[in-house]
Amino acid sequence: MSNPFSSHRRKRRKLKADINVVPYIDVMLVLLIIFMVTAPLLNLGVDIELPQSNARPIEQQKDPVLVELSADGRYFLSLQGAPSEEVDEETLLRKIGAFVRQNPQVPVLVGADRRLDYGSVMTVLASLQQAGVPKVGLMSAPAERVAPAR
């Protein structure tokens, strides 16, 4: 008897020409996770030092209308050099609207306490625009000069 294995021809495997993409998909998913985690961190603020200026104050022909917001959200109004008076938002808008209609060139300045949130200031600016004020300026105090460290 002859050997059954010797007569049986051994089958040759065909070469596979496909690319295995599973490792590439794994790498892509890892990179996707890394980018998803780091992307929100890229939107953080950057500390910058704004330039200082020795600009002179603007010369104005008329006394401005002053709108001041206190730290607790109260409104104060001063019309052309008059003493400041506390008013509510509705009275503020009514008085400023009437005053600006009579004196369209009068400057309107808004000043707010530094502890007041930005949203409150933006609300006042939007309300002043609706009341008919064409231009509004923002007041600030001059920065104190600090001597450079040696």
Image: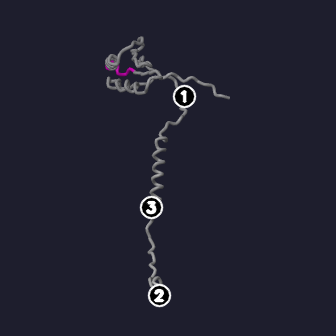
**Bounds of the magenta span?**
101-106
Q: In which quarter of the view is residue 84 placed? A: top left
- Dot in front, 1 or 2: 2
Q: Determine the residue located farthest toward the right in the rendered image.
A: 150
Contact, mark 3 vs mark 1 (Cβ under 8 Å)? no
In this picture, is 50 found above or below 38?
above
Q: Which residue is mark 3?
A: 21
Indicate the secondary structure of the residue bearing disc 3: loop
Q: In which quarter of the view is residue 20 placed? A: bottom left
Amino acid type, residue under disc 1 in the picture: Ser
Q: Name the spot of residue 52 as percent of width and height, x first.
A: 55, 29
Residue 30 in the figure: left or right of residue 101: right
In this view of the protein, which residue sits in the foreground, 60 or 41? 41
Q: Earlier in the sequence, mark 1 or mark 2?
A: 2
Q: Residues within 10 Å of mark 2 (few under 14, many from 20)?
A: few
Q: Residues within 10 Å of mark 1 (few under 14, many from 20)?
A: few
Q: Earlier in the sequence, mark 3 or mark 2?
A: 2
Q: Residues within 10 Å of mark 3 (few under 14, many from 20)?
A: few
Q: Earlier in the sequence, mark 3 or mark 1?
A: 3
Number of labelled discs? 3
Magenta span: helix, strand or loop, mainly? Answer: loop
Q: Which residue is mark 1?
A: 53
Q: Which residue is mark 2?
A: 2
- Dot in front, 3 or 1: 3
Question: Residue placed at 40% from the left, 17% from the top?
Answer: 74
Disc 3 from disc 2: Cα separation: 47 Å
Q: Name the spot of residue 93 as percent of width and height, x first.
A: 33, 19
Indicate the secondary structure of the residue bearing disc 2: loop
